Structures are given as C-alpha cells and as structure tokens.
Amino acid sequence: MDYKSFVEKERSLLIAPAGYGKTHTIAECLKYTEGRQLILTHTHAGVASIKQKLTDMKISSGLYSVETISSFCRKYVHSFWPNDEIPPQGVNSKLDQCYHSFIVDKASYIVGLSLVQKVIRSSYQGLFVDEYQDCSLAQHLVILSLSKCMPTRLLGDPLQGIFDFKDTLVDFDKDLSNFELAAELDIPFRWRKKGNNYALGDIIKSFREPLSKSEAITCEMNTKAAFYVIKVKDGDLNRKDSNYRERLSNLIANKNSNPDFDNLLIITPEYIEEVNGKMVKKGGIKDRLDILSKVDFTKSVNLLEAIDDKTFYSLAIEIDSFISSVKRSPKPLKKIFNILCGLFYKTSPTNNKNKGLSDWFSVKPSSIKEDFNIKNKQGAEKELSSKLTTIISTLLDNPSSESFYNLIQFLRYDLRLRSSRRRELVNSITKSLKDSYRQDISVHESMLAHKNLMRRVGRKTEGKCIGTTLLTKGLEFDTVAILDAHKFDCPKNFYVALTRCCKNLVIFTSSNVLFDK
C-alpha cells in the first residue's frame, strides 16, 4: 500500500475489508499529511474504536479529529441555520426522522458555502471518511461539498453496507466515479497480530468472495482454528433443557476461566417471522432481553442499545410531564410506579428478597381512588420504608427533576432494587435528571444534550455484550458468538457479524450450509 500516493490525490478511494488494516492505514496516512485531519465515520462505536486504535498506535491527537457524519452535520446546521426552522429532535420517531433528514439535507448546502468552507479549511487540511459503504446519498452530497475545499480520502467495503436508510445507499461503481481507486487491502492483519488467530482469519477470508456474490457457504467445525459450529434445532433456545441453552449459558459463564471468553460479543440476527398469522420483526431489544433471561445467570452481559432508541426520549418526556402535572393528577403514585417500571424490575425473584418495586409499593383494586401505597415494613426495613415515604412525599409536594433523581438514587443504593437489564437507559435517565436540575433545563433537553455528547465522544464497549450487527459495527471482541446463523437473510449482515472476532468464533445454527438458495 502506497500511503503517500493515496494521501496526495485530491479524491481517492480505498477498498478496505473489516480487519484488513483500515485504521492502521489511516494512521500511516496521517504521517504524510500536513495540518489537522478530519476523520468521519457513522457510529459512536466507530468513533470510539478509531480513537482507541490511533491512541494505541501513539498517533498524536493533535493530528486529527474524529466525529460521526451526523454530529459533524448537526454542528454546522445548528451554527449557521435559524434554530426556529430546525425540526424538534427525539420527540417521536416520525419527527426524529424529519430532524435527521433535515440536518443532513441542509448540511450539504451549508458546507458548500464559500464562507463556511473558509471556516472548515481553517480547522482542517484534509478529510478521511471511514465505512463509506454506509453513506446514504444525502450524506454523500455532504462529503462531495467537503471535497471541494480539502483533499478527501474514502475508505469502505461494499460487502459491509448494512445500514437501512430510507434513501438509497451510495453505489461505489455509480456514485464514486470522481474518486480514484488507490488499492484494495487483501491481508487480514487483525488475525495476524500477536496473540490473535491467524487460521481463523483465513477461514473468514475464504467466506468473503462467495458472500459478496450471495452464494452459499459451508461452516465446518475447526477446533484448531477456534472456529466452532454448534448444530441446534430451530426454537431450541426457548426450551429449558436444550443443548442450545446449556452451551450458550456455559459460554457466558466461562466455566473454564479462559480470559478470551471474558471479552465476548453475542450477535443476534434481525429477521421477519410469521407469528399467529402476522409478520413480526425479531431480534429487537425485547428479544435480546428474553435471551439474556434464559442464559445469562451471572448477569454479566450488557445490552447494546441504539443511541437514539426512542425509549430514552419518551421516558424523559414522561418524567417532565409528571413533574409539570403531578399536583393535578388523581393517582400520582400510579404514575410514579409506571415510570419506575421502565427502570427497575417490578417483581423480585423468589431467591432475592426485596429487590423488586412490588416489594415496596402495594397495589389496590383499581376501583379505589388511590390504587398505590407504600408498604408498611417492620423490623430493620421499617426505617427504609419511612425514608421512602418521606422521599415520595417530597416529590409530590415539590415535584422537580432533583426530587425524582433523589427517589431513583434511593431505590438503587438504599433499597438496592434490581435495575433493569437496560443499564444504559437507567444510567442515561439518572444523568439527565442530575443535569436537568443543575442546569435548570427539562429532562428531555438534558437527554438530548447527553446523547449528542455521546455521538461526539463515543462510548467504550467492554466485557460481555449482546447486540445486532448494526449495533456492533466497528467493534472487536476476542470471542464472538453468532446466534441462529441460519436466520440471517442478508449475506452482508452475516459477514459483518463474522468479522467482529479476533480469537474465537462460535456459530449456533440449524444448518452448516448458509445462504443456499
């Protein structure tokens, strides 16, 4: 790879498969650039991954700035477009979609203005765009505008184009004719690193060509290469004593104490399934939580969530609504309870005393005016019950984000209630409540600011996690377990799943032959 030649071109393109040294290439290219370089990608996970790798390679942070395309667009639109014309964000999915479409559409115009381009050139002297296969045509127009004011280098892989935009994704052959193809990386460097798995990398590489042509592949067990194929029956995950459950739960528990299995990513497919005569989308949050309830007995697996999942915003809005209307509400405790059910388990397991909301809140028949009460406790719990009553009374008498924050913290740390498996949701709501009363803004406004910050700085993903291919793009784990591989309906999604591992790959499937049409 001739890094210098790639950098010196005004518009250049590099085909870069996952694990083939793309970030290393960016790092090497930075050695041949002058001034600060702008690096754009699509996800907060991708931002975090690039930053970490460049840090590990001891590339000075003064040489680059890493952002998502969305955050970059948002920054310039909010700076140069009248704010009263910008649609609201995070209110509901339809309006949220309007917001993001508006931002990208106006960004292509704004960054094309001569005045704005002067501002951009004063900040950056070159541009790298990662994961270009995930660009929508609208985002592509933004990049084209940027390419008019600074050298632009694109890195991507058509086989990894899995983002589901309403508009069409960029076509490498049709839309990138103005960019010169510099090279195609062909060595799976990730698996050749010391401590990683050379043989596993070669197996994954062998799948690339047939998957790119939507041809069938055969997954054959190879224990020497740490490539494990576990045959399961469709639906076995729902059966208590199935081999599927046992093997997956043992993998999560890491009973052999292999450190490679402490860094574990579980990937579930997203697909459409007929249920009671209706076509239902599977693989969402509820399905992943259901899987964890059946196999994660150590409670060690973190649920990966979309940064803009509507629940974050809807719950924040619900809290704001409660604060503003609680004194007029006929059943305020019921509203508090319903909000808390989004953050804590309603009931506790039989072997875990006083860990659910129902252990502290009593439910009366709905015919009674106030159908919720705080339970009277005896003994050591009497003082805690009294404190809970006081905190609730304070919230009802003086409703605010601070008093709601104090309630949640008391439930978490004094009563030690079991928080929802959606830990990111719980932590985000808690932080938004705290920022809300400190900055004197609504909880919803605070949540928007929190999420926008996450987009800019990214988030670290460590330990054991579960997610979809879309949520795990750009991430690397020592061990990857792909569930129900036979249910993947898109070769691109499966390829992305395959390429998240470094040392071990476990595939649960009902058939060794996949994508056999």
Image (cartoon, rainbow, N blue to C red):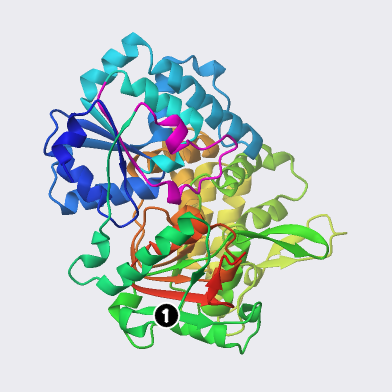
**Within the image, what quadrant is residue 328 found in?**
top right
Q: Residue 381: give x, y in percent of width and height.
A: 55, 75
Q: Residue 420: give x, y in percent of width and height.
A: 55, 64
- In the rendered image, is residue 36 in sight? yes
- Image: 290 above or below 305: below
Q: Amino acid at mark 1?
A: Tyr
- Image: 392 above or below 294: above
User: Does 305 lie within the magenta span?
Assistant: no
Q: Residue 294: give x, y in percent of width and height.
A: 58, 78
Q: Residue furthest top?
A: 115
Left/right placement of residue 403 relative to residue 341 reads: left
Residue numbers of the magenta segment = 150-178
Name the residue located 32 percent from the left edge and 72 percent from the top edge. Answer: 200
Q: Which residue is mark 1?
A: 228
Quarter of the image with the C terminus in it:
bottom right
Name the residue located 61 percent from the left edge and 75 percent from the top edge. Answer: 348
Name the residue located 59 percent from the left edge and 49 percent from the top edge. Answer: 311
